[in-house]
Each structure stands twice: as structure tokens, then as C-alpha cells.
Image (cartoon, rainbow, N blue to C red):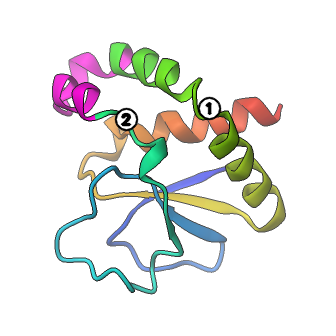
């Protein structure tokens, strides 16, 4: 099962490969930070969708549906994510403060659903 965490969290033994799934690089984090193995901005929500959502909890359900539509065009990246998760485990990282309405929750669900 794909894990999710904040990019600022310490690496845990169960994390596997830690992939930053934000479109923008987080402030205050070096590009060579050992907590991040890879950066996949291509699987993050579009700038337009992020702006519309604005991390408003009342829009999360609609945001999730729109984001899943965007992810339909990222089959290769999702396949790679599934393969990494099965081989060594995968933790999707984000700088988002409120993890209950974070796009990585949707991304993890999509990765896990496609494996089933």
C-alpha cells in the first residue's frame, strides 16, 4: 500500500522510495535533501486545478474527481509508481500542511486501485 507523508518528515524504515509529488519544489528544502529520493512534478495536479482548489476542504471531493481525470493521462508514471511500490515500497511526499485534503491522498488511492 502506497504511503503518504510530508516532505519535512524524517525518513522512516518502512518508507521505501520517497518521491516528492508536488509541482513546485518546497521552500527551505535543498535539492539534495536525503529525505527525497526522486521528484515527480508530472504527477502533481495542474496549476489551474491547484489554484481552483486552494486547499479548501469543501472542494476536496470535486478536486479529487478532477485530479483523477488529470491522472488518466499519466499511465506510464502510475505504472512506474506501482512497480516501485511493489518492489521496495513507495512514500509520496508533499509540502502540504493539511494531509487530510492533500493531493497525495488521491494519488496514492489511484496507484493502489490500479494494482488491484
Q: Is residue 7 above or below residue 10?
A: above
Quick check: 27 left or right of 30?
A: left
Across the whole image, how many numbered discs are drawn on residues? Answer: 2
Give the residue at x 24% y 65%. 26
Secondary structure, magenta segment, majority class: helix
Q: Is residue 38 above or below residue 113?
A: below
Q: Determine which residue is flagged by label 1.
A: 110
Residue 7 forms part of the magenta stretch: no
The reply to whether dot 1 and dot 2 touch (C-beta < 8 Å) is no
Disc 1 versus disc 2: distance between alpha carbons? 13 Å
Is there any visible trace of residue 15 in the rendered image?
Answer: no
- Quarter of the image for residue 55 reads top left
Q: Position of residue 34 (x, y in %)?
A: 45, 86
Q: Determine which residue is flagged by label 2.
A: 45
Give the residue at x 17% y 30%. 51
Q: Is residue 8 above or below residue 40?
A: below
Secondary structure of the residue carrying tag 1 is helix
- Give me the disc on residue 14: none
Residue 52 forms part of the magenta stretch: yes
Answer with mark 1 or mark 2, whichever residue precedes in sequence: 2
- Quarter of the image for residue 93 reads bottom left
Q: Which residues are magenta?
A: 47-61
Compare residues 105 and 46 and report the one nearer the observer: 46
**Quadrant of image for the C terminus:** top right
Is there any visible trace of residue 104 in the rendered image?
Answer: yes
Mark closer to the observer (1, 2) = 2
Give the residue at x 66% y 72%. 14
Quick check: 74 left or right of 103?
A: right
Amino acid at each position: 500500500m502506497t504511503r503518504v507523508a510530508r516532505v519535512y518528515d524524517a525518513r522512516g524504515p518502512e518508507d521505501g522510495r520517497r518521491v516528492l509529488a508536488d509541482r513546485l519544489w518546497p521552500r527551505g528544502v535543498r535539492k539534495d535533501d536525503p529525505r527525497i529520493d526522486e521528484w515527480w512534478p508530472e504527477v502533481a495536479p495542474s496549476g489551474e486545478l491547484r489554484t481552483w482548489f486552494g486547499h479548501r476542504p469543501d472542494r476536496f471531493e470535486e478536486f479529487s474527481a478532477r485530479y483523477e481525470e488529470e491522472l488518466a493521462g499519466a499511465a506510464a508514471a502510475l505504472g512506474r509508481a506501482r512497480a516501485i511500490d511493489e518492489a521496495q515500497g513507495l512514500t509520496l511526499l508533499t509540502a502540504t500542511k493539511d494531509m487530510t485534503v492533500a493531493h497525495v491522498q488521491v494519488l496514492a488511492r489511484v496507484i493502489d486501485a490500479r494494482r488491484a
